[in-house]
Amino acid sequence: MNQTETYYKKMTTTPVARLIVTLGIPTTISMLVTSVYNMVDTYFVGTLGESQQGATGILFTLQAIIQAIAFMLGQGSGTLVSKALADKDTREASAYASSAFFTGGALGILLAVVGLCFLNPFLRLLGSTDTILPYAREYGFWVLVACPFVICSFILNNNLRYEGKAFYAMIGIGIGGVINIFGDYLLIRIIPLGVFGAGMATAISQLISFCLLLLFHHRHAQATIHPRCISRRAALYGQVCRLGFPALIRQGLSSIGNGLLNNLTKPYGDAAIAAMSVVQRFTNFIMCVGLGIGQGLQPVASYNHQAKKYRRVKRGLLVTMAIGGALICSLAVPAFVFAEHIIRLFQENAQVIEIGTYALRWSSVGVLFMTLSVPVNMLYQSIRRPEISSLLSMLRSGLAFIPVLLLTTWLWGLRGVQISQPVADILTGLISVPFILHYLIKTPGEDVPDNIKEEQ
């Protein structure tokens, strides 16, 4: 049995729960490692002062912009690679993977050049104050230098996941994350380079992750990444962008929302920006569990939908919601109870602790509703229903968040800033329920070829 046939059997006959856990746990671990090194960045930079820590919150928005491009190309191409492999067409899979990879590299270079040329006005637009700006410049320089490698790494990571090679994606991201943690210690504590050193450590770790992921893809993926595989068909790029559009919307609106959040927080001082930065980083740590398990669903849903094994897709959605919900609860409840202690780990400033504690408790409640919104969002993207996935993506990041942020800030000032994202999360989760029920009720029964028996 060749590699394509073996992969087909694995994706269509392995019990769904086992398959999602097998694919989702490595992804969750890699995302948690990334989140941990972001929090380590926040911790080490926080020891330098609240303005320095506020800079990490400003750059969080810039990183979300970069990730928006990367996720669009990575998830769009990954969905199509999975579809091509389900059709046993490795040549077409290689065209999708190669075209997305080299397009991402070119866009990364362009974004880095433009960003470096207009760094000061761009950072002010993202909400930087006069006292935060010098530190944001130091960190932002390295974020932009690493931009092409970050985008290409996300594309490689997603394509490995959609081929069922989540373990290699985890190793590539995980090693880079560990290197970043040691780099922060070395370049902030041992060699006192401050925020500039934190940015340098991040850039070096991302370069190493890129090299490892490229090596793993070359050795273990069925799709080939090579200039000769780049497609000249405009329709192919349109397909990739169309299917990746929900991810672009999700991350892009998140960037706009974070920039607006920073600007509305600015009147309350650097301490407020620093506090919200810590809360964002820790909330993202909790979210990684839901996102990681949800990304374990994506290749399963994409492949089995193409193979017309709809019952497996339905079961996969329910399994993902159950496992993701249990894991998120296991982190959100302690975060609510020990919110003050968590904020104090990152910053000793009394004002930062007070603002951050209140915001983290609200965020711990809001993140529970991601159990409803994340899996169904990723499901519709994976089964090539981008119009529904785009709508669900826009809710948390923009359609719900931005109006809620503006309204709550107008009504309650800083308290409104603190509760805006959790309220948007709750609304998004509730609005997602009809879409979950629609898929479970309206999707047709399973259509399995006679010569293939599914293992229950």
Image (spheres, rainbow, N blue to C red):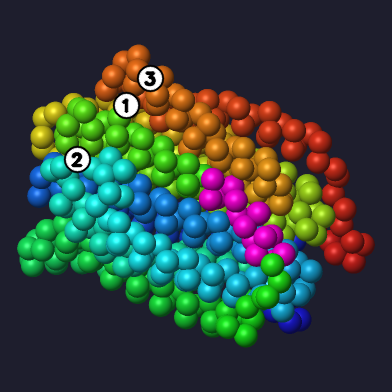
Secondary structure mainly formed by the magenta segment = helix
Residue 418, magenta (yes or no): no
Marker disc for residue 418: 1
The picture places residue 45, in percent across and down from the top left corner, at 16, 51
Pointer 3 residue: 408
Identify the secondary structure beneath mark 1.
Answer: helix
The picture places residue 150, in percent across and down from the top left corner, at 41, 65
Labels 2, 3: front one: 2
Amino acid type of the residue that numbered disc 2 sits on in the rendered structure:
Thr
Pointer 2 residue: 129
Give the Cα separation between the discs numbered 1 and 3: 9 Å
Amino acid type of the residue that numbered disc 3 sits on in the rendered structure:
Thr
Q: Residue at x 70, y 56 (%)?
A: 302
Give the Cα separation between the discs numbered 1 and 2: 19 Å
Going by the image, does 216 lie left or right of 34?
Answer: right
Between residue 214 and residue 32, name the one nearer to us. 214
Query: Looking at the image, is mark 1 or mark 3 earlier in the sequence?
Result: 3
Q: Quadrant of residue 367?
A: top left
416 over 247 or under it: above or below? above
Identify the secondary structure beneath mark 3.
Answer: helix
Q: Residue at x 17, y 32 (%)?
A: 269
The picture places residue 87, in percent across and down from the top left corner, at 79, 69
